[in-house]
Image: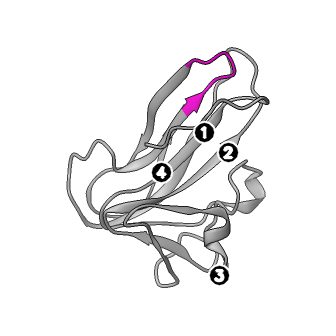
Amino acid sequence: GEVSAPSTSGPDISVVCGMEQDVLPPADPSAGGIVKNGGFEGTGLGIDWGGYMEGYVADQTFKHSGNQSIKISNGGARQSVSLSAGAGSRITIKGYSKAVGTSVGLWDYGIYADAAYDDGGNLWGQIATFPGGTHDFTLGQKT
């Protein structure tokens, strides 16, 4: 996972999306999430999303909504976000994935988040998992 330095406004959450032969679709932009370009739209993906391991490529063939998604083979996309949430707040990470021939039983096939708190504490390895194998778009979420 990605380790982030504590921010002054709240926890930093780094997200690594997917593993192996999965396709992550665009998120609903009207949902008002804090992730920049959660829909993976446009030609400037590299502005909002960095690569993890072997990274990702834009894909216009498979999409949950919008015009494109990202396709990942042994890698992922990552982004660090900051938010201000009071003590005891619950944060949900979620997204969709379509898998083609992905290994079954992978603990890290999903959306991964680490949190670094202002008080110096951390919450590592929060994962919204997806099933392996071959399946149509499936929602994974973790609160």
Q: Which numbered disc, 3 or 2, marks the residue that appears first in the sequence?
A: 3
Q: Which numbered disc, 1 or 3, marks the residue that appears first in the sequence?
A: 1
Which residue is under mark 1? 13
Q: As shown in the figure, which amino acid type bears the numbered disc 1?
A: Ile
Residue 105 position within the rendered picture, expressed as x and y whole percent measured from the top left: 21, 46
Q: As shown in the figure, which amino acid type bears the numbered disc 2?
A: Val
Q: Tell me, yes or no, whether the two marked residues, 1 and 2, touch with CB atoms within 8 Å.
A: yes
Dominant secondary structure, magenta: loop
Which residue is under mark 2? 81
Which residue is under mark 3? 43
Q: Residue drawn at (59%, 28%), measured in percent from left and top?
A: 116
| Quarter of the view holding residue 125 | top left
Task: Determine which of the numbered discs, if any, sits on residue 77 in the image.
Answer: none
Q: Which residues are magenta?
A: 115-121
Task: Determine which of the numbered discs, if any, sits on residue 16 in the image.
Answer: 4
Q: Tell me, yes or no, whether the two marked residues, 4 and 2, touch with CB atoms within 8 Å.
A: no
Q: As shown in the figure, which amino acid type bears the numbered disc 3?
A: Thr
